[in-house]
Structures are given as structure tokens and as C-alpha cells.
Image (cartoon, rainbow, N blue to C red):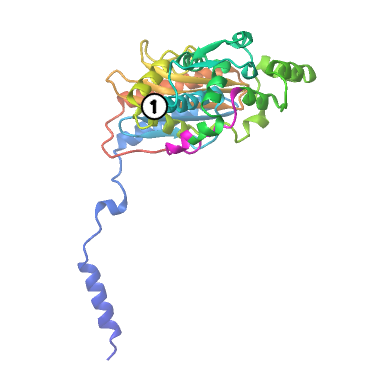
Amino acid sequence: MSLARPVSLFAAFGLFLAPLPGADAFGPPPKPLVQQSAEAKLLGEFARFAALSDGSVGIGVRDLQTGETQALNGDTLFPMASAYKIAVAGRIFALVDAGQARLDEQLALDPALASEGGIAWMFSRPGATLSIDRLLELMLQKSDNNATDVLVARAGGPQAITGFVNKLGVTGLRVDSDTAHLLYRAMGIHPLAGSFRQNADAARRADPQLVTRDIRDLPNLAFAAELQDTSTPAAMLDLIAAYESGRALSAASTQRLFTIMANCETGKKRIVGMLPPGTAVAHKTGSLNGTGNDVGVVRLPDGRRFAIAVFVMKDSKGHVARDRIIAEAARAAYDYFLYAPDRAHGLAHKT
């Protein structure tokens, strides 16, 4: 008599008696239909807003209490433009926390770091200095490129800033240039010497299309396709969350950072544009030919907070359309997090 059949029956009997796998073995329990519906509506709204641009749009939002994240093109790389300045600020505050810098430390305004606009005129005054704290205000509130590049140099350069971000576990965000060299790349020029003003003026004389592109706010598609100085919406959310949680900086530095960002003077029609009057928002904008960004933290009436990062690139519709996309996304996220049902089934991640 063959033993094959009894052995197979015994194996089957043993399998029958084995404990059934727990519910976790099949993944988390399904989310309630009302939550699924709310998420689908939010993402549908994001897609509708993105259609207002003829370029590419990335939107990421995160509940800073639960970690729930919803995103459209959340893992796509976008030029940061001046939004990179919140990474610069983080590196500076980290140096302060480590005792390697002080907010009242005076930094020389080296003429070699002067670009255009803002406090550029101050760089021609021999011996002119400003405190780190004042430079941070100028950088984050007025988006002053000259103040930024003084801080980039004090931070140890772009690589040190990227290193700071990476040590926080944030991937998908890289800083490769100070603002002057970022603008050089956006213009498509790579000068080896001379002041920024001299080089920029020479480039505009040689190629009048640079002036046209600035006036009409048209994108430089080659620049927008570069990997340098880019971030995904998800990476920017990770950086903001690292700040807000206190994981990146001391309590004092975290508070000072968000206090400065809460007084941002640029982008009044972006994140804050459609939110209820008086909504507390700490944010940083970024603008460049065909590019419009805004990233930050929004406080809900009940005290909860959510992070938001909206990037628009390769857009030729103009800043009014870009601002509206950002404002609409912020309002949709505000309503979603304020009114959507409780997230009883853990974190939700959409990309």
C-alpha cells in the first residue's frame, strides 16, 4: 500500500488545524467608504486645479498630527526656485543649535555675493554687515536673493545644506547652487568671472530673448528639466514635518523659524489667497520663469496643522493662473482636513 495518500491527508489535516492568519496579514482594514469618497474628491480637485496650467503641477498635503498624506505628482521633481531658502534657514538654525553660529552674529556683505534687487545696494558700502537673524528675515519674508547668498556661504555652501537635509532622512531634495548661480542656470549662461550684474547684462544684450522671457514670464524648458536644485512635493513635506515636529531643530530655533515664515510678505494670493481671513500660515514662496511654488504650514481653527507644498513648472499661463492653482489647492486641503471624517484606520498615502 502506498504511503503517499496518508501523508498527503495528514499534511492537509495539519494545515486545517493550523491557526488562521490574523487580519493584519491581509493588510490594514479597508477605510470607510465616506473616507474613501473624501480622499477621492480631494485628489479629483487637485487634478482639476492642475488642468489650469499648461505645464506640470505637483501638490502634497500632510496632516502633521496623523501623518496622513495626499498628493498629486508627489514624487515628481520640480525646480524649487526660492522655496529652497527654507532648507538654507534650517541649516543656519542647526549651526546656531550646535553653538557654531549666533543669531546676533554680524556677517559681512561681500560684494562678490551681490546679485540684483533687494539689498544689493548695501554690498557696495565698505564694512557693511547684517546680523544672521536680520538676514533670515530678509531671505524668508522678502525672498531677498542677496541676503540668501550671504547665508548660503555662512552655511558652508550648497553641499552642506543638502547634507543637513539628508541627515534628517529627507530624500528627493537637493541644493546645488546659491541663488546667483541658480539664476545663471535659469538664464542659460555659465560665466567664470565678473559681477552678477555685469554677466546678466551682457547675456541680455547678447540674447534679447532673455528679456522677452522675463517680461512674458515664460519657462526655460531646458532649465526646468535639470535635476539640480529640485525637490519633490513629498520631500518638501518631509522637511517641513521635520521642522514642525522639533526633530530637526531646538524648540527655540523651531519657533523662530516659523515666526519668521509667518510674516512672509510674498505670495499673498498663493497659499493664503483663499483661506479664511486670519488663518495662521507660515510659508515660503518661489518664483522663476514659468515656475511658481509655495510651501508651508497651515493652522486649522481647532489647532491642528497641516503641511502643504505646491509646485508649478513649465507653465506659460502666467503668475495669475499659477497663484490660483496654489490658492485653490490650499483651500481644498483646508476643507478636507477640517471637515473630512476621522481617520480611524491609520495613515493614508496617495501619490
Which portion, as a residue range, is magenta? 164-179
Q: Main secondary structure of the magenta part?
A: loop
Write down the quadrant of residue 22 in the picture: bottom left
Q: Which quadrant would the C terminus be assigned to in this image?
A: top left
- The residue indicated by pointer 1 is 97
Is residue 351 shown to the viewer in this render? no
SS under mark 1: helix
The structure residue drawn at horizontal position 47% and vertical position 14%, both measured from the top left corner, is: 137
Which one is in front, 45 or 58?
A: 58
**Residue 177, image x, y percentages:** 60, 29
Q: Residue furthest bottom?
A: 1
Q: Which quadrant would the N terminus be assigned to in this image?
A: bottom left
**Residue 57, image x, y percentages:** 53, 29
**Residue 198, image x, y percentages:** 73, 16
Is residue 123 shown to the viewer in this render? yes
118 is higher (above) or lower (below) than 209 = above
The structure residue drawn at horizontal position 41% and vertical position 18%, both measured from the top left corner, is: 282
How crowded is the residue under tag 1: few (<14 C-alpha within 10 Å), some, or many (20+)?
A: some
Is residue 169 highlighted in magenta?
yes
**Residue 244, image x, y percentages:** 36, 27
The structure residue drawn at horizontal position 34% and vertical position 36%, both measured from the top left corner, is: 36
Tell me the kind of residue under disc 1.
Answer: Asp
70 is higher (above) or lower (below) than 193 = below
48 is higher (above) or lower (below) than 136 = below
Is residue 148 highlighted in magenta?
no
